[in-house]
Amino acid sequence: MARSSDELIETDVERYLEQQQRKTLLRFIMCGSVDDGKSTLIGRLLYESHLVFDDHLSALETDSKRIGTQGDELDLALLVDGLAAEREQGITIDVAYRFFATEARKFIVADAPGHEQYTRNMITGASTADLAVVLVDARKGILTQTRRHTYLLSLIGVHKIVLAVNKLDLVGYSRETFDGVDAEYREFAKEIGITDVVSIPVSALRGDNVTRSSDNTPWYTGPSLIGILDSIDLDTDRRDGPFRMPVQWVNRPDSDFRGFAGTVVSGALHPGDPVRLTPSGRQSTVSRIVTADGDLDEAVSGQAITVTLTDAIDVSRGDLLAGADAPPSVADQFEAHIVWMNDQEMLPGRSYLMKIGTLTVGLTIAHPKYKINVNTLEHIAAKSLGLNEIGVCNLNLDRPVPFDRYVDNRDTGGFIVIDRITNNTVGCGMLHFALRRADNIHWQSIDVNKAAHAALNHQGPCIVWFTGLSGAGKSTIANLVERKLHQRGFHSYLLDGDNVRHGLNKDLGFTEADRVENIRRVAEVAALMVDAGLIVLASFISPFRSERRLARDLVSTTEFCEVFVDVTLAVAEQRDPKGLYRKARQGELLNLTGIDSPYEPPEHPEIHVDSTSLSAEQASDLVIAWLGAAGVIESA
Amino acid sequence: MSPLTHLQALEGESIHIMREAVAESERPVMLYSVGKDSSVMLHLAGKAFYPGPIPFPLLHVDTTWKFRDMYVFRDKRVAELGVDLVVYQNPECLKLGINPFSHGSELHTDMWKTEGLKQALDLYGFDVAFGGARRDEETSRAKERVFSMRSPQHRWDPKQQRPELWRLYNARRSPGETVRVFPLSNWTELDVWQYIHQEDIPVVPLYFAAQRPVVDRGGTLILVDDDRMPLEVGETPSLRTVRFRTLGCYPLTGAIESEARDALSIIGEMMRATNSERQGRVIDHDASGSMEKKKQEGYF
C-alpha cells in the first residue's frame, strides 16, 4: 500500500467517472400498498445503494423509536414518508419521486400510493415510467389491488413488469408459495395483454434478493431485484419509432437565424432528412441540428435540439415536426380513454382545453360510451365521470391536431384536460383513433345560405343571449325587445328557458351535468336559427361561463350579444315571480342558481343591465340600440 | 446509437422544462442564488435558447449576509454572460438591520428571503420563476411538481397540486397566481457535481477547499467572513482547510473540513460522503417538517 490516499481517490474517481459516461437512466414505478411493504422496499433500495446519509440515519433512528413499527430495528419505510400530513396518517398521499444509483444506472422511482382512491396518482407516476415493480405480499397473493394496478399499467402503456413477491421470510421462504403467486399473476397479466413479466422472491425487511442473491432462497437462481433493474433492456420503441418533435419555441435571435426548438420524443433526425410539418402538411428538409455544443449529425429521442430547415416555411409553437416518410394523422374527432382526476365531475358537452404535445386546443367530451370498473374490468354505463373514474369517450376539438395512437407513441397520443375557469389539470387521456364521422358527414353545402336568408329579411342574423339569476327580468326584457323588433318588421324568435324545457329538453333535470346539456342544445338550436337568418333572443339563467362561451363560439364574433341582466340575490329573492326562492329556502327545491348552485357572472358582456336601476323598457331600448350600432338592424 | 447517458437525459429534460415555461409565460424570471444549482441552471438556460440570448432576467433576493466571494462571483458571471440581473433587498430588513446574530436564523430567513422574494415577485410582476430546488434535497420536495402553483398570496398547497403527466406541463394561471418551475427536480447532488465537472461550469470558489478562518460553534464551522461577525468570549478564529457543500448566508452555513480542491475531488469525497447536503443549513433543523411549513408560507 505505497500509494497515498489522495492517489487512491484520484484513481477511483477516474474509474468511477468513466463508468458515469456509460451510465443510463431508468424510470420506474413502484406499485403496492403500505401493507405490502412498499415504503420498506424503496427505503431498502436507497439504504443499500448508500444514499442514506448519516444525518438522515440518525433522524431515522430517532423516528424509528418514536413512531416506527419494527421495534428496536430501523424502520426503513420512514425514509420515504415525506409530508407531515401523511406521517401523521401513516399513509402516502401523493406520488413522490426518489433517486438512487448503481454502477450501471441512475434510477428515478415514482412512489405511487396503493389505495383505491388514488388512481390519479398511479397514472401520473406511471406516465413517465419505462418499467413497473409490482409488489405483493406472499401471504396474501394476488389481490384486487394488484389487478387494478396491473390494469392501470397496461392502460398507461407500461408493459415491462417485475413482480416482487415480498415478505417471503414470513412464509418460510416457501418455493410453493412463490410459484403459486407467480403463476396466478402471469395468467391474469396475459389476459390484459402483458407478457413481459419477471418474478422475484424478496424480503424487503430482511434484504433477501434485493441487492444480493439470498442464501434463504437456494431454489431461486435468477438475479436480485437490482440485478434485474440494472440489466433490463431499455425501451427501444421510442428510439426506433418514426421521428416526432413537437415545436416548443421559435428561436429568432436575428434576421439570419430561424430555428425550431423542441425535444425529440421518438425516432432520430439527421441533416438532410425530409420532414413534414403537421397539421399544415408542408414539407421541407433539415438543414442543421443546432445545439450549444455544436451542430449534431444525429439527434435521438430525449434530446433537446433546435432545427433549421432549408425552406422558409411558416412554423409556430404547437406544430409537430415529423419524418416525411411516416407522418402522423391529423383529425379533430377521436375516441379516447379518459381518466378523470378532479373532485368536480366531468361534464359532457362542456368546453375544456386539451394540451397535447405543445399544442393547446378547445375540447368537448361526449357522454362516456362506458366506464370501467378497475377492479373487475367490467364496462358500466355512465353519464359522466367522477374523480378517479376511467371511461371511453368521443372527443371533439375546435381544430384539427396531429397525433399518433397512444399505443404507438405516448408523447403524441397522450393529452391532459384543463378546466378553462380554474386552469387545473382535471383529467388525462389516451387517443385510440380518429373518428371518421367528421370526414364523412360533411356540412351540406346549400345554395340559399345564411347571407341569402338574411338579405331577404333585410337584417343581419344574431343571437342576443340574456343571462342572469331567476327573477332578474331576462324574459320581460327579451319579450319587449321582440315586440319592438316585430313592430319594425324584423324576423326574430324568442327561445325561453321554461318553454324549451317543456319539449326539446324535457328529459333534462337541474343537476350541473343536465344544465350544461340544456344550454348546449339551446345554443345549437339558436345557431341553426341564425343560419336561417333570424335574430334569436335566448333567455336562460345559463349560470356557467363555459357554456355561454360555447354558444358564442358557434356563431361568428359579430353575431353574438351577451346581455347580463344583473340583480342582487336579495332583490331577485324579494321579487320571486315564480315562487322558486321560497321553495328553495324551504328545502323543497334543489339546485336553484344563487341558493345552492353557483352563478358565474360574465366578465365582458356586450350589454350590462343593472335591473334595479333600469326599467325593462329602458333595458330593451339598450338592446335595440346595440343591434342598430352593430348593423344587425337598420338604426331607427 | 446507444441510449442517452443519464446526464444527457437530465439535460434534455431540463431544457424542455425551461422552454415550456418560457413559451407559456409573460414575464419569466430565474431565481439566482449564486450557488452551484443556480450555476447549473444558468448554464442550461444558455443551452436552451442558444443561439439566442437567455430571454429572461435573473433575480437575486439578497440578504446582505451572503459570503463576500458570492457577490464577487455573481457580478463577474453576470458581466461575462451579458444577462440582466435584478438584485432585491427587502427594504424593511435594511431599515431594521435584520441579521442572524440578533434576530435568530428563523426571523432572518423569513424576512429577508421569504418576504423579500414575495415582494420582488409582486413588484416586478413576474409570473413564472425558475428555482434550482431538487427533489433529493429534502423529503417534502420529493412530492413537489416541476410546475408548482402559488396562490396570489404565494402559498403552496401540497394537497391541491396539479397532476403532472408525460412531458406535459400545465402553466396556466388565474390572475395573481404565479408558477415556480424547478428544472432540476430530478437531479441529485451527485448529478450536479458530475455535470459541473463534465461541462466545466464556473462555481463560487468557496465550494473548493482552501485555508479559511473559522470558528467552531457547537460542531458547526462558521467562516469569519467579515467584521460584522461578533466573536464570543475566548473565541479566536483558526485557519482550517475547509469547503462548503451549500452556500447561503455565511453565519448560517457550516463548512466541512476537506481537501477537495476541484469538482473531481468533490465527486471523490461524495463517494464516501456521509452527510446530506442540507445538514449544513441551520434552518432545516428548526423543527421536524419545517421545510414543508416554510414552503406553505412561500419559501422557495
Image (cartoon, coloured by chain):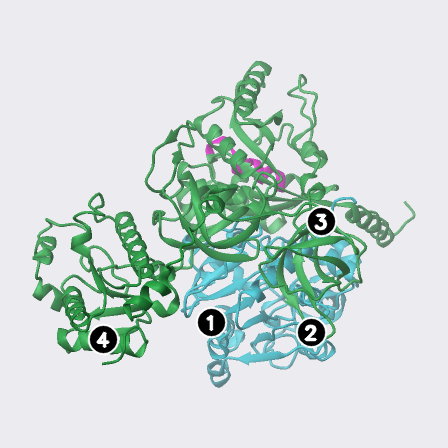
Asked whether the beta carbons under mark 1 and mark 2 sit within 8 Å of each other, the answer is: no
Chain (green): A
What colour is chain B? Answer: cyan
Q: For residue B209, which quarter of the picture?
A: bottom right
Mark whose residue sits in front, 1 or 2: 2
Residue at the disc numbered 3: B6
Judge depth for marks 3 and 1 and give the one in front. 3
Q: Residues within 10 Å of mark 3 (few under 14, many from 20)?
A: many
The percent position of residue B4, horizontal first and vertical second, equals 74, 48
User: Which of the two marks, 2 or 3, is nearer to us in this view?
Assistant: 2
Q: Which residue is mark 4?
A: A624
The chain containing the residue under callout 1 comes to B
Residues at marks 4 and 1, CA–CA distance in whole angstroms:
63 Å
Residue A464 lies in quadrant = bottom left
**Gap in angstroms between the C-alphas marked 4 and 2:** 51 Å
Provide the residue designation for mark 2. Answer: A253
Q: Residues within 10 Å of mark 4 (few under 14, many from 20)?
A: many
Picture quadrant of residue A161: top right
Contact between labelled residues 3 and 2, with CB atoms less than 8 Å apart: no
